[in-house]
Image (cartoon, rainbow, N blue to C red):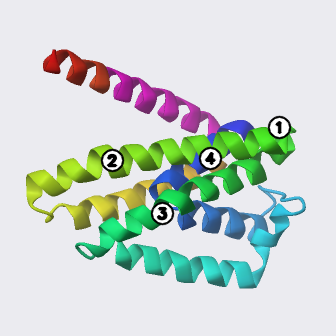
Amino acid sequence: MDIFTAFGLSASAGLNAYIPLLVVAFVARFTDWIELGSPWSTLESWWVIGVLIFLSLVEFFADKVPAVNHINDIIQTFVRPVAGAIVFAASAQVAEVHPILALAAGLLIAGGVHVAKSAAVRPVVTATTGGAGNVPVSIAEDIVSTILSVLAIVIPVLIAAIIILVVSWLIWWMWRRANRAA
């Protein structure tokens, strides 16, 4: 089940880098649901939790301000995949996935979600709503990231089903879009 948790958390990091890190940090610190080994146990430190809370607040507000949200997405292009790699590796350690493979998988999953969000979804929202839809979409992304992070830990099999459905829908949507263009 740890591998499903890792997939869900890294996908969540593609939407918001700091929410899944905070969820893992809090769950590891206050419950026995996640046992983080070295070096990932550093996430349980109050200093790290404090920094993650601060960075979460910065990202939350930066993503709601027009023009600043585009700069934030450029910065997050580097941060979100790294966060995805960290949460994937930290949560997949129990499944005995090689650390390099875990980091690469988390990087690709979070990076893929981030690219889909920032290159496909957000430009369409900005163009069709004149930027007015960016704040509600950003809030929805934060909510989805939080729910996905919690569900990834509590119900990992559900995350596997959600990932399969979302990937299937994205493939169908791209196929349909390509056929319309032709």
Q: What residue is disc 1 on?
A: 97
Q: What residue is disc 3 on?
A: 76
Magenta region: 156-172
Residue 168 position in % (x across, y down): 41, 23
- As measured in the structure, the alpha-carbon distance from the residue carrying label 3 to the one carrying label 1 is 26 Å
Residue 83 position in % (x across, y down): 62, 59
Check disc 1: other Cα within 10 Å, few if <14, some if 14-19, many if 20+: some
Q: Secondary structure at mark 3?
A: helix
Majority secondary structure of magenta residues: helix
Disc marking residue 119: 2
Q: Earlier in the sequence, mark 1 or mark 4?
A: 1
Q: Residue at x 83, y 47 (%)?
A: 93
Q: Earlier in the sequence, mark 3 or mark 1?
A: 3
Residue 125 position in % (x across, y down): 19, 52
Q: Earlier in the sequence, mark 3 or mark 4?
A: 3
Q: Is residue 148 left or right of residue 177?
A: right
Up-down relation of residue 117 to residue 132 (above or below): above
- As measured in the structure, the alpha-carbon distance from the residue carrying label 1 to the one carrying label 4 is 15 Å
Residue 79 position in % (x across, y down): 56, 62
Front position among marks 1 and 4: 4
- As measured in the structure, the alpha-carbon distance from the residue carrying label 3 to the one carrying label 2 is 13 Å
Q: Quadrant of the N terminus?
A: top right
Q: Tell me which amino acid carries mark 2.
A: Ala
